[in-house]
Image (cartoon, rainbow, N blue to C red):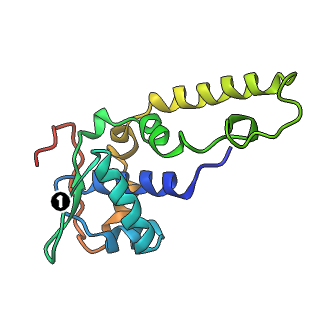
Amino acid sequence: MRLTVRTNLAMRVLMYCAVRRGELVRSVDMAEACNASVHHIAQVVNQLSVLGYLHTLRGRTGGVRLARNPAKVTVGEVFLHFESNVPLTECFDDKGNTCPLRQGCRLRHALQEAVNAFYGALQAVTLQELVCDNLRLETLFAGHACAAGAAVTSAPVTV
């Protein structure tokens, strides 16, 4: 199984924003910290904003910040938003399935169980767990524009 670039970037953006919780951060800084193009980060930020994960503020002094409590955001939930429309294999694509084995194949059921187990395991992991007391991550993100990273706590997000 391979995740899409967007899913990978979505998690990087969310972790960056969680580490800098309460701060307005710029897409250019996230792009640099996440080793991605500003264009790709902007697309992911837009999607995360539409999904309610981020608040955005446009303009010269604008930026983005986490809109939800990281303890309430699960990795599985984010992955489902970004991956659910991407079929694992041809037989999961109702419109484009041309597999000649589909009538007698039992592999599809086994793959579906594996996918369910994958997402089930990720539902147990929160954004908070990924960033809380993660000094290495804070250090990695500290060198990018806003410098002094905000401490990550369990306190609710105020926007």
Q: Which residue is mark 1?
A: 23
Q: Position of residue 118 (x, y in %)?
A: 59, 31
Q: Is residue 158 visible?
A: yes
Q: Given the current orientation, which residue lies at the most extreme left position?
A: 158
Q: How many marks?
A: 1
x then y, percent, for residue 94: 67, 35
Q: Residue lying farthest bottom? A: 60
Q: Position of residue 33 (x, y in %)?
A: 40, 68
In screen coordinates, is 106 left or right of 71? right
Residue 143 visible within the image? no
Between residue 29 and residue 45, name the one nearer to us: 45
Residue at 36% from the left image edge and 52% from the top image edge? 15
Instruction: Using the image, determine if residue 49 lies above or below residue 155.
Output: below
How crowded pointer 1 is (Cα within 10 Å; few <14, some 14-19, many 20+) is rated as: some
**In the shown orientation, is residue 158 left or right of residue 65?**
left
Q: Nearer the viewer, residue 145 or 61?
A: 61
Quarter assignment of residue 41 = bottom left
The amino acid type found where label 1 is placed reads Glu
Q: Is residue 21 above or below residue 30?
A: above
Quadrant holding the N terminus: top right
- Residue at (25% x, 57% y) in the render: 20
Residue name at image x 35 percent, y 64 percent = 141
